[in-house]
């Protein structure tokens, strides 16, 4: 398995590759940005200026964040509304340094570019729009949109659909992701190449 620690190093490993598919969260941007953005939206709703910092401290402690904060505030009845705000936010997030240049370089090389990502459809679409990725890549598949959570990785349906759209041999396709427990099972099964982005900033990073 190819392993990289800088996303730009992808370019070194694309010999024989015509189609490049990326994971989204913690591969093209840092998911912690999304989490903090959501906490700031909740803080605005609650009119509690320090709420985002407190919510983040519960997150870092591995606790059920919204439950713990609202219990402390004596406002547990607001849980569903806070969850709705978090999930439907239009997030304040940015691509990792070098990602726009990487995508531009691959486009100039005439490579097909795609994203396969798991997650709630509205949340993922908002992330993609906030990052401008809907204009930066050729095709995007949100696995939940295919029929629910059962289509999330390691299910191989999204990869088969992308191959059908691109009409490329699986051997000429590569997937880049950060979650070693699920991202590469389908690509390996299908005969695709794959790259593990060992991202120390990621939520699923394991030392």
Image: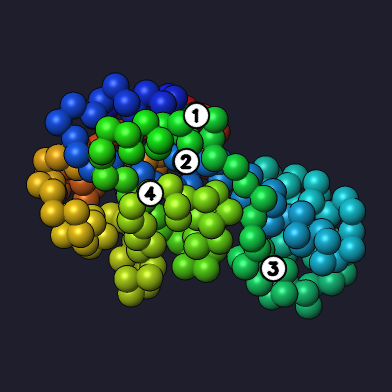
**Residue depicted at 34% across the width and 28% down the height:** 10
Sequence-wise, the earlier of marks 2 and 4 is 2
Sequence-wise, the earlier of marks 4 and 3 is 3
Distance CA(mark 3)–CA(mark 1): 30 Å
Q: Classify mark 4: residues with Cα within 10 Å, few (<14), some (14-19) or many (20+).
A: some
Distance CA(mark 1)–CA(mark 2): 9 Å
In percent of width and height, residue 123 lies at 54, 63
Q: Which residue is mark 2?
A: 28
In percent of width and height, residue 54 lies at 81, 49
Identify the mark at residue 137; answer none if there is no mark.
4
Q: Which residue is mark 1?
A: 98
**Residue depicted at 32% across the width and 26% down the height:** 11
Out of 137 and 198, give the one closest to the viewer: 137
Distance CA(mark 3)–CA(mark 2): 23 Å
In front: label 3 or label 1: 1
**Residue depicted at 41% across the width and 26% down the height:** 8
């Amino acid at each position: 398995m190819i392993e990289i620690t800088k996303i730009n190093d992808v370019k070194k490993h694309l010999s024989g590759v015509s189609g490049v598919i990326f994971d989204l969260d913690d591969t093209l941007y840092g998911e912690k940005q999304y989490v903090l953005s959501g906490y700031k939206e909740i803080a605005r709703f609650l009119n509690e200026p320090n709420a985002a910092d407190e919510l983040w401290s519960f997150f870092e402690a591995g606790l059920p964040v919204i439950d713990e904060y609202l219990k402390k505030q004596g406002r547990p009845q607001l849980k569903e509304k806070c969850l709705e705000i978090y999930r439907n936010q239009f997030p304040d997030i940015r691509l990792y340094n070098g990602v726009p240049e990487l995508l531009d370089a691959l486009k100039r090389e005439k490579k097909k570019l795609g994203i396969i990502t798991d997650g709630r459809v509205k949340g993922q679409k908002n992330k993609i729009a906030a990052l401008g990725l809907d204009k930066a890549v050729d095709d995007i598949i949100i696995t939940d949109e295919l029929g629910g959570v059962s289509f999330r990785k390691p299910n191989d349906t999204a990869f088969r659909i992308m191959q059908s759209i691109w009409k490329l041999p699986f051997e000429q396709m590569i997937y880049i992701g950060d979650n070693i427990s699920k991202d590469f099972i389908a690509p390996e099964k299908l005969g695709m190449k794959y790259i593990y982005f060992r991202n120390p900033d990621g939520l699923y990073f394991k030392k």
